[in-house]
Amino acid sequence: MTGVREPLLSISDLCVDYITDDGNARAVNKVNLDIYPGETVGLAGESGCGKSTLAFAIANLHNAPALITGGKINFQGRDILTMSPEELRQFRWSKASMVFQSAMNSLNPVITIGDQLVDVVLAHETISVTEAEKRAIAMLDMVGIHASRMKSYPHQLSGGMRQRVVIAIALILRPKLIIMDEPTTALDVVVERDIMDQLYDLKEQLGFAILFISHDLGLMGQITDRIGIMYAGKMVELGETEGIITNPQHPYTQGLLRSFPTIHGPKERLEGIPGNPLNLLDVPAGCYFQDRCSQCDTICIDVMPNIEVLQMPDERQVACHKVSQGDAL
Amino acid sequence: MNQLTEATMVEQVVTNETGSQSIEVENLVIDFALDNALFNRQYMRALNGVSFSIKAGEAMALVGESGSGKSTCARTLCRLYKPTDGVLKLNGRDINASASKITQTELAKQIQMIFQDPFGSLNPVHTIRHQMYRPIRIHMPELKGDAIEDYMLGILERVGLSPAKQTAAKFPHELSGGQRQRVAIARALATGAKFILADEPISMLDVSIRLGILNLMADMKEEGIGFLYITHDIATARYFAERTGVMYVGHMVEWGNSDSVTQNPQHPYTQLLISAVPEVGRQRGSATVDGKKSRIPLWKPDSKGCPFAARCPKVTDQCHTEMPSVTQVAEDHFVRCFAL
C-alpha cells in the first residue's frame, strides 16, 4: 500500500527527554514513523507512553523541561527541528495543524468563534477581512455549524459543537497533516460517532493525512489505516490496522487488545495486562515491558530489543526478542 | 489476593450468612431548583420515576450520557440528596423515613461509595494507614489495638495491594492511579459495607489497568457485596454487571438482564447508544440507527411525553404527549416505548 510514494512526514530516531531533578525521563525513545499523504495513522498506548509528547514534537512545540535530544523530523523534505522561528510560524497550522486533548477548552472564552477562525486566516494569509470571514463561514458550514454561530461565544455552544469548531480551525488553512490528540475522549459515544463521520467526509473532500492519538483501540480499529503501539516511549509494534487488530505480535499489543470488554463478543473473564506502567526515571537494561510480560526470558532482561520488520505481508514491525526468534504465540 | 487473614475470613462468613440483603429504589423523583426565587421557583427534574433494586452479590449497572442522572441516583442512596418523591429501602427499611430513623453512621456502614477520581478522593497529607484506620475505628469499634492493624493489612492484601505493610506506610502520591483506586475500594470494604456504589470507577484509569479493577470488583461481588456500577461504557456494564439500566434525561428507558439489554436492545435510545460504541473489526459508518441531531431536553416537573421524542427516529404524535408505559419484552427485560 505504501509503495514508492514519498512520505509526507518522516520521523527518524526521535528522542524527547523531560529534564527533572531526579534525572532525565526519556518520554520518546528512538521512534521512527512515516506518514504518507492522505493516510490515517493511529498511535495507541497507555498514559505516559509518550504518544502526546511525540505529537508535540512534530510541531516543535516543546519547551523546557522537555527537550528534543536526538533524531530528525522531516516534513516534505524539510527538517522541522532546524527551522528558524519565522519558518516554524509559517509551517505550524498551514502545513500541519493540531487538535489538542482538551480541545473543547482550547477556545478563547472571550472571543467569538468567528473572530477566532478569522484570526487564524489573517495570521497566515494576506487577504481582506471580508474574504477571511467568507472562508470562516464556508469552513463552519463544512463541519455542520450554521453561519449564524459566527457571533457566538464558546460557552454558548455544546461540547460537541465546540469540538467541531476546533476541527474547523484546524482545517481552515487546508493543512496536509492534522494531528489529533485524543479528540473525542471528553464526549459521549453518540456525539463521538457523529464527529468522526463528519471528519471522514471532510478527509475525502480535502485529502489531508491524520495522525490520530488515542488509547481507544476500538475507535482506532474503525478509522485508521495503520497503527503504531507505544510503550514507555518505545514504538513496540507498527503495521496495518487490520493485521494489528486480528493478529497482534507483541505481547503488549496482545494484552492491550485483551483489555477491552466487547459489546457483542463472547462474555468471558478477561485478564488484561498485569502490573503497573513503567517509571521512566528507573528503566531496566533490557526490554521495558519485561516486568509485565508473560513470556519474559533471560535475553529480554539483558538486551533491549530493536524494532524489526517481520516476514509478514503487511511489513509489520515489532520490537520483541520472542517474536523475532519465532517463539511467541 | 487469596491470602485472607482471620479477620477478613470472619467478615466473609458474615457476608455469606446474610445473603438476602438488598437495596430497593421505588419511583425515585428528584427535583433541583434552577434559581433561588422566593416565588415561582423553577425546577428541573433530574430523576423521574426511577426504580431498580440491587441484591447482595449482584451488580446493577446504570448507563447513559453525561447529565442523565446516573450519579444523582448514587448520591441519593448515600442520603446526600433528599428525594422529592419515592422510597429508598435498605434491607426493607425506608432510609428516609423519620419513624425508623437510620443514622448516617449506620447507613455508611452498609453503603459506601467509590468515586471516579482516585487522585482527588484520598487525602494527600496522610498515609494510607491513617486513611484506612479512620473508617475501621468508626465502623468496627469492637477491633482494638493490633487487631485493627491486622484487619487493615488483610483488607489491603484482599484488594491486591501487596506487600500490604509497605503500601500502608506510603502516601497517596507514591501510588499509581490503579493502586489508589484499590485503596479507595479497600477503604469502602473496611467498613464492612454490603453495598458499594461505584461512580465511574475506571474511567480515569489507564486502559491497561482498568480490567484489573473491574476484575477485583467482580471478585468482591462473588464474596457477597452488591454493586451499583455507574458508567457511560455499555461494554463494561455488560462485562461486570448482571443487570443494566439505560438512563436518558432522568428516566430509565430500558432495563433488565445485561445480556438481553445489550444483545437485543428494544428502545431506540439503547439501539443508538450501542450502534455508536466503537468496536474493533466493525467498519465505520455501519451503524444501523441514526439518532437525529437535536438538543437534549431540560426536563421540568410539568414536561410531558417521552424524553427521547425529539431525537427518536420512530417518533409519533403520542410520544410528545404521553409517557410510554412499561412493556415486558423478556423474562427480565423491560422497556418504556410505544414503538414496540
Image (cartoon, coloured by chain):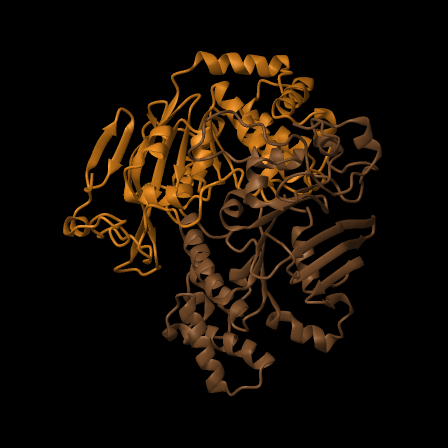
Q: Nearer the viewer, residue B66 or A286?
A: A286
Q: Nearer the viewer, residue B147 or A87?
A: A87
Q: Give above or below for B233 relative to B9.
A: below
Q: Give above or below for B72 relative to B299.
A: above
Q: Residue A183's spot in the image, x, y percent?
A: 53, 56
Q: Nearer the viewer, residue A163 or A65?
A: A163
Q: Residue B206's spot in the image, x, y percent?
A: 60, 41
Q: Residue B200's spot in the image, x, y percent?
A: 49, 40
Q: Locate residue A62 relative to residue A103 in the image: left or right.
A: right
Q: Residue at x 15, y 52 (%)?
A: B317
Quadrant in which the C terminus of chain A appears: top right
Q: Residue at x 26, y 24 (%)?
A: B331
Q: Locate residue A134 relative to residue B42 in the image: left or right.
A: right
Query: Which chain is painted in orange?
Result: B
Q: Residue at x 51, y 88 (%)?
A: A128
Q: Give above or below for B8 relative to B293.
A: above
Quick check: can you spot residue A278? yes
